[in-house]
Structure formats: C-alpha cells, structure tokens
Amino acid sequence: MYRREYTSDWDFRDSNTKEYTHCYHNYPAMMIPQIARRLICDFAPEGSVSMILDPYMGSGTTLVEAAIKGIDSVGIDVNPLARFIAEVKTTKFNINEVEESFNYILRKIDSFDISAWKYVETDFKHITKHDYWYSKENLIKLKYLSSVIDSMEFAATKSFFNLALAETIRDVSFTRNGEFKRYRIEANKIPTYNPNPFVLIADKIKRNLDGLNNFLKDASEFTVNISDCNSVYEIPHSLLAKESVDMVVTSPPYGDSRTTVAYGQFSRWAGEWFRFPNAKNIDRTLMGGMPKKIDSIDTVALATELEQIKQSDIKRYYEVTTFLDEYSRSIENVAGVIRKGGRVCYVVGNRTVKDVQIPLDYFTAEIFEKHGFKHEITYVRSIPNKRMPSKTSPSNKKGANVSTMTEEYIVIMTKL
Ligand SMILES: C[S@@+](CC[C@H](N)C(=O)[O-])C[C@H]1O[C@@H](n2cnc3c(N)ncnc32)[C@H](O)[C@@H]1O
C-alpha cells in the first residue's frame, strides 16, 4: 500500500531559508534547505553515510547541507549557471582575500568616471538585443565591474564576485521581477527604471560575505564534485562507482521547462554575459526539452491520467510522455549507483496538464520499485515559500488558469 502523509511538519514557514551560502544567488524552484537538512539527518540509511548524490542539483542546496554535515557529495546539472552557483556556494574561500578584494572593488567603484568609458558596441555583441534589455549606462557599468573583477589580485576569489555580478546582471536588465521568463517591463516604466549596478552588487557581496562567514564556521571537512552530465544518459562513473552512493536528496523538474519552470530563460542573462556554453538553448537540453512521438509509457500509476491527456490533446500528450520517458531513464541511472540499503529522497511536484493532475510521486515510486527499491512513505507539504508558478494555463487559453502547484511530495525509498 502506497503511504502518503499530509503534514505541516515539513512547511518550515518561519525558517530562514537563506542561511549560510544559501543566500548567494536566486534560482528557480530552489529546495528549502531545511528539507534537505532534515532528510539527511532523520532519513539517513542504516550504516555510515559518506556520499550523497543530487542528480538534478540546481543551485546546490543539497550539496551545501551535505558540506555542513561533513559528508562528501556529487551534484549533476546540465545547466552551466546551476553548476556555477553550486560551485561557488560550496567553496571555502579565504575570508581575508575575499575582504581585501571587496575593498578593492569598492575603491574602484568610487573612482568610476563614466566619461572615461566609451561605449563599444562590439563588447556586447554576444548579448541578445542588449540595447533592448539594458540601458546604455548600466551596460557600461556592468562591463566596468567585469573588468574590475578580472583585474583583482586574488584570482582565487573571482568566482565569488562574479556570482554576485551574475545576479546583478539580471536585476538591472529590463526583465520583470518575480518572473523567471524573459518578459520586458512595460515601455512606460522604462524611463524611470534605473537600478544602480554598483549599489546592487555591493549589497549582494555584503550579504554573501555574511553567508560565507557562517558557512566557514559550521562546515566540516568535505569534498564536492560537480558534473555536467545529463542524468538521462549517464551518471559520472569517474566520480561514482556502481553502488557507491549512500543517499540521494534531490528535487527533479516536474515537467519540461517550456511548459513548467523556465530554468533556461532565467539562466540566459548570466549565461550570455559569461559566454556559458549553449546559453540560448538550455531549455532544449533539459529533461523533456525536445518532445518526441512516444506513444506509450509503461506505467500503472499514471495510466488513467495519460489516457485522459491523450484524448484531449495529442501534442501535450507527447510532451508529457517524452518527459516521463526521460525521467524513467534517469531514475534507472540513479538507481544503479546506490548501495544496498541506500536511501533515496525525491521532492516532486504534481503538475496539471489539460486539467488532469499528474501524480509524479506515484510514478517516481513505481519506477524506483522496478529497479529494486521499496517505497517507505511520501510526505505531502504545502509550498508557501518556493518560488514557482501556482497557476498555469494548460490549455494555453488566456484566463483559463488552473491551480497546479500548491503541494510538494517528499518521496522516500530504500534500495533492497
Ligand atoms: C528543481 S531544479 C533543482 C533545484 C535545486 N534542488 C535547488 O535547490 O536549487 C531541477 C534542476 O534539474 C536540472 N535538470 C533538468 N534536466 C536535467 C538532466 N537531464 N540532467 C541533469 N540535470 C537536469 C535543471 O537544470 C534544474 O537545475
């Protein structure tokens, strides 16, 4: 019998979700650190726990929590921005070098003289429609910040500052706040919209410096490895031998990014600025990003729902089946690296497509069971503070919104 427990124990409504390095950089659909922390503490498998894997690492919430407990971890993500954030969040920077570099940046900001900076069109050629998304003045200031960071004496600290710059780049663009997609703010608001990149970056660096100090105080000895693998096709066997992982704590996407969470669009600002690979097309590389005509999925858990979607919209059906097919393959890959008795914790969302809710928690448990796992329990929590759409228009009709994501499912399984 599949056990679902509805509980408020996992809500963490009043918790500080920005402790430690969790404050560094925003990312779509971040996991609440307290969830990863409780899973690692209370649901660790029997025996010792020396390796934790997150196969859809995102901004690295699980990796930071593993580091604080002194547990080694491996994180996988196809999105270069995710890997950059996770890398910086789990680096023990030398605090004196960071502080000295920060003072250097502040001095450089003080001595900035815009008249000495000529706008060179070619500097921004790699940024799509740069004059549509940014004011000229802010482009010049961002470019200046980039060159200041590049000229810093302590090269090892550059990534710490470039991460603050990455968030600033998006904040000063004309994209709307509170949206992961690239929507420009209304034209009439643009003349008065003039955020100052210098003020923004200085505030972010101060915030991140506090986070770093707390992280350095509490993090034990650990190693972190970050991989750019696509979990649908492989798990990095150079980092993880067969059956070597004690625990998985992860929150996978709950659908393709085009119709659910826009990871690629969110990441494009920093991606283009820093010339990350594939910056314009990340969404296509993510799970379900390139729909194929997959006619059926071997599932009992979702059979009724899939049939309903198929009857209503064949195109949407193929989008869903492509995602589920790739999700199953990635589960098979993950299952192979977990040791006997190892524990797997997947935090998933059950989205709605064509008014049909897709219970991804059942499906997750079903596929793991096919690969030798036992389902223990699924906790259902409401999601008050995870930034993701709670409404969508599955039929793509204006005003036809239905509620999709108000609950999250923490699926816990053990390898037999
Ligand atoms: C819900 S987010 C993870 C958020 C993360 N728990 C955090 O706290 O920031 C899901 C992640 O899965 C990644 N992803 C999607 N498809 C992937 C694939 N095939 N292989 C590896 N990562 C993938 C996305 O880039 C995204 O960062």
Image (cartoon, rainbow, N blue to C red):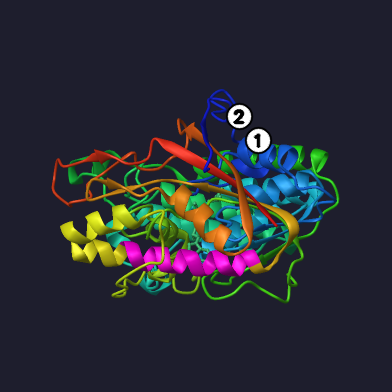
Q: Main secondary structure of the magenta part?
A: helix
Furthest residue to the front? 1
Give the residue pinned by disc 1.
19
- Decide which of 270, 30 is in the foreground and name it: 30
Furthest residue to the left? 398
Q: In the visual, does 308 lie left or right of 230?
A: left
Residue 33, compared with residue 73, is above or below; it is: above
Place residue 152 in its image quadrant: bottom right
Task: Tell me if residue 333 is in the magenta stretch.
Answer: yes
Q: Residues within 10 Å of mark 2 (few under 14, many from 20)?
A: few
Give residue 16's mark. 2
- Decide which of 331, 201 is in the foreground and name it: 331
Q: In the visual, does 39 lie left or right of 356?
A: right
Amino acid found under the numbered disc labelled 2: Asn
Contact flag, marks 1 and 2 (Cβ < 8 Å): yes
Magenta residues, start to end? 320-335
